[in-house]
Image (tube, grey):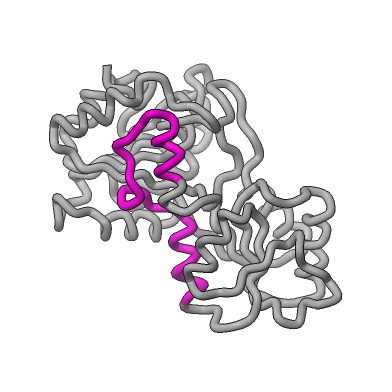
Amino acid sequence: MELTDFKAAIDPYKVIFFDAFGVLKTYNALIPGIENTFAYLKDTGKEFYVLTNDASRSPRQLADSYHRLGLYDIEPETIVSSGMLARDYLQTKVKNGVVAYLGTKNSAHYLETAGLTAQSISDLSLDNIDDVSALVFMDDEGFEWGTDLNKTVNLLRKKTIPVIVANTDRTYPMGLKTVAIAIGAVAKMVEDIVGKQFMRFGKPDAQMFIFACQQIQKYRGVDRSEILMVGDTLTTDILGGNKFGLDTALVLTGNTRIEDVDMRINSTGIIPTYVCESAVVK
């Protein structure tokens, strides 16, 4: 597909939804020049939100991670995390007992703020699972992949409980040319092993976009045609935006590379409104 200048792509829209990894940053650095984009959004009065499948930390901690990298425009109220959706579901469906989780201590924020008792899978004993009422896949860090994944499989063989995947991503960018396995891929492997179906939250499902639209402040009642979804992954960001009726911009700084973008679009049939080199306004 022909590349579109990112500034020209966003100009017709009032609200911009950004994915995080591969669009605004990699694992430990900002996409070079992304600060210019937020300066332009501020100058033109456009509202923005970060829609992320990252459930590893609270919105406050996620915002702080941008601030440490020198991007101060992103605040907790501009972040919509899949962890927030998982929290709302658990708060409604799980009334008591212990919620076991795979992830970091920080990711337990979403469980604890729902008033639930959270216990890391690392601290769980398979000899004492009577009180376990749910299991949540939160993050790919914070547990031993061998020992604790085996424990997870055996927990689900021993007990029938709801299983929630709070991050559907299967990979995330570590740098401009490398990726790492995300918790969504781990959950899919365990799901196949135990032969049970898990509940998933995050893009491409509509709940993420509905939740984000409810957060819009400046342009209450904005039409979907006035919102642009910007992402680096066809099967989550672009598919989700397309299904929700939003225009979409695929950027080539993360999971989709310029050398295979046409092949991926043709093979998936997922067609973005725009393809841009990056989300940087030059």
Quarter holding residue 36: top left
Tell me: 116 left or right of 70: right
Bounds of the magenta segment: 62-91
Tell me: 167 left or right of 282: right
Given residues 247 and 7, the one toward you in this image is: 7
Question: x, y (%) of residue 13?
Answer: 18, 38
The answer, for residue 85, to whether it is visible in the render is yes
Identify the residue shown where x is 50% and y is 62%: 110
Quarter holding residue 118: bottom right
Identify the residue shown where x is 15% and y is 56%: 220
Given residues 42 and 86, the one toward you in this image is: 42
Question: x, y (%) of residue 248?
Answer: 32, 38
Given residues 30 and 246, the one toward you in this image is: 30
Question: x, y (%) of residue 5?
Answer: 27, 19
Would you say residue 152 sits in the magenta stretch?
no
Secondary structure mostly seen in magenta is helix
- 266 relative to 183, above or below: above
Identify the residue shown where x is 31% and y is 34%: 273
Tell me: 139 left or right of 110: right
